[in-house]
DNA sequence: TCGTTAATGTGTTTAAATTACACAATTTGG
DNA sequence: CCAAATTGTGTAATTTAAACACATTAACGA
């Protein structure tokens, strides 16, 4: 490691005092299942919060970029490599971790639940409906809310929800995702109009299977067409 | 300090390896002067970047919240206590600081230039036009751009620009601030209409002084009236 | 096989928001 | 008293968003 003694000019504390802070990354991994927005959580096993739900996180390694650390967590927990990930906020209250000073940078991620292989039940790793969570370990509920809010803002003018769906999806499924994220109902005709106008969807000329009603057409997202800037997608 | 040995369960590295990361805070302190958006900078004096412009930052102290650290920097550098401050993003590339591993959380701040007492010329502390900056020390240019972009988004639906102005201001001054931040021209009549509609401004029944033309009325911002959510203020 | 059920697919009308735009009035300064 | 510069003001045109209904399709069960 490079010499670090040069930090002393920052203040009157000695170098080693500044290296008593640990840095972690916490990931809010969103999925969509059974018409609900869900988040991947485990049961906390540190004594102060035993049994409470906890986000997936880890300390950042000394030779690891912040983004790399969150990709690593995603990969370790879901087996997925190519995921949507966005940094949200860093939480640095002195007392936020009972074991010492840990500052955490939070990310949210959007994955397709059906692509995820949960590493079997380790600490009861599972998908939990976001709207059913009213308590978590540490400040993780605050983090979850911050990430959910950021997601809400994001989907309004960026085509990111496709990351929550399989490659082929119907317009109903797409609309359900928006409704789950925003916790609101949308007008079907206006919704369709908006997406066709954006020209992001490729008609696959296939129909849904195994639905107990008239099947809808299937589409895929064409990322190459993300050129025009949408206004108010999510309304 | 509380025991920290419990961190070991996070991975195979020993505890002390995780405490080789330092955490800093960097503040992008925006001001408005001579019709331009400016930022408070100093000349960097570490050898790798000597002479380049640098943002104001410091290492976070072990017993200090992140937000507290940025308020401290603001207070130390500008003498101001009650400022607008917003966290933007955390930059954690392994090699971003030549002296070792330093992860930095960035904030932007909005202050009234005329309220600031610059601690006389320490390291050439000065206000610099944002649009004239094309090179900075470290990754500070990236940070500046990220904060400027966040400010642009913010002003579109939040009444924060008042923090850049004196208590009493004319509508022209207010519009100039928006134009400086967004680097665009706005229609005067539509701009006025929008702000009167919002009902945020209190007519002080006073006129500008010492302008070489017809003086405009002076207003102040009434924070109590920030109830209705604006749509597209900045257009 | 036929009715019931549940969802798909499709346009138009209305309201709201945004944009474009011009001229008289006021003050300063020469 | 004239020129220069800027304030103050309203309406029409355009664009965007919101509200809304009915015929069609496939599955299911009687």
Image: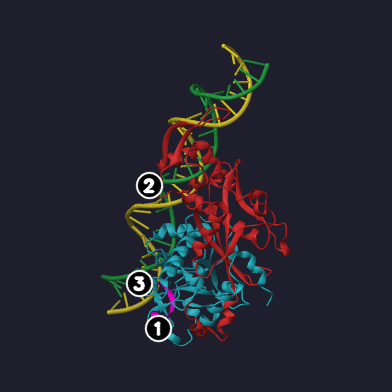
Chain colours: A red, B cyan, C yellow, D green
- The CA span between labels 3 and 1 is 20 Å
- Lower sequence index among marks 3 and 1: 1
Query: In the image, is A45 to the left or to the right of A232?
Result: right
Residue C27 pos. (x, y %): 39, 73
Q: Residue at x 40, y 67 (%)?
A: B180
Residue B120 pos. (x, y %): 46, 88
User: How busy is the neighbourhood of tag 2: few (under 14 within 10 Å), some, or many (20 plus)?
Assistant: few
The residues colored magenta run: B36-48
Residue identifier under label 2? A224
User: How busy is the neighbourhood of tag 1: few (under 14 within 10 Å), some, or many (20 plus)?
Assistant: few
Q: Nearer the viewer, residue B195 or B65?
A: B65
Q: Nearer the viewer, residue B18 or B209?
A: B18
- The CA span between labels 1 and 2 is 44 Å
Residue A159 among those drawn in magenta: no
Q: Residue at x 37, y 62 (%)?
A: B185
- Kindly indicate whether the residues beneath marks 3 and 1 are on one polypeptide chain: yes
Dot 3 and dot 1 residues touching (CB under 8 Å): no
Secondary element under disc 2, as helix, strand or loop, is: helix
Secondary element under disc 3, as helix, strand or loop, is: loop
Q: Nearer the viewer, residue A194 or B210?
A: A194
- The CA span between labels 3 and 2 is 31 Å
Chain where mark 3 sits: B
Please state which of the two labelled residues, at mark 3 or mark 2, is closer to the viewer: 2
Chain where mark 1 sits: B
Instruction: Decide if residue B210 is in sight here.
Output: no
Residue identifier under label 3? B134
Query: In the image, is A55 to the left or to the right of B128?
Result: right
Residue identifier under label 1? B47
Predominant SS of the magenta segment: strand
Residue A160: which numbered mark, if any?
A: none
């Amino acid at each position: 490691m490079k010499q670090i003694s040069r930090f002393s000019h920052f203040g009157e504390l000695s170098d080693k005092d500044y290296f008593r802070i640990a840095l972690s990354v916490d990931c809010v991994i969103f999925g969509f299942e059974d018409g609900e927005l869900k988040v991947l959580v485990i049961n906390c096993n540190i004594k102060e919060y035993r049994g409470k739900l906890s986000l997936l996180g880890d300390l950042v390694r000394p030779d690891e970029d912040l983004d790399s650390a969150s990709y690593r967590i995603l990969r370790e927990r879901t087996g997925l490599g190519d995921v949507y990930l966005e940094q949200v906020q860093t939480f640095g209250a002195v007392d936020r971790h009972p074991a010492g000073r840990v500052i955490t940078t939070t990310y949210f991620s959007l994955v397709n639940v059906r692509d995820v292989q949960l590493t079997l039940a380790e600490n009861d790793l599972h998908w939990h409906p976001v709207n059913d969570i009213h308590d978590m370990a540490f400040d993780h509920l605050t983090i979850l809310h911050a990430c959910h809010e950021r997601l809400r803002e994001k989907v309004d003018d960026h085509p990111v929800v496709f990351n929550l769906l399989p490659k082929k999806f119907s317009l109903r499924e797409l609309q359900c995702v928006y409704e789950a994220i925003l916790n609101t109902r949308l007008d079907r005709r206006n919704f369709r109009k908006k997406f066709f106008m954006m020209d992001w969807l490729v008609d696959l000329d296939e129909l849904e299977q195994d639905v107990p009603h008239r099947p809808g057409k299937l589409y895929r997202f064409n990322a190459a067409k993300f050129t025009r800037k949408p206004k108010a997608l999510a309304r």
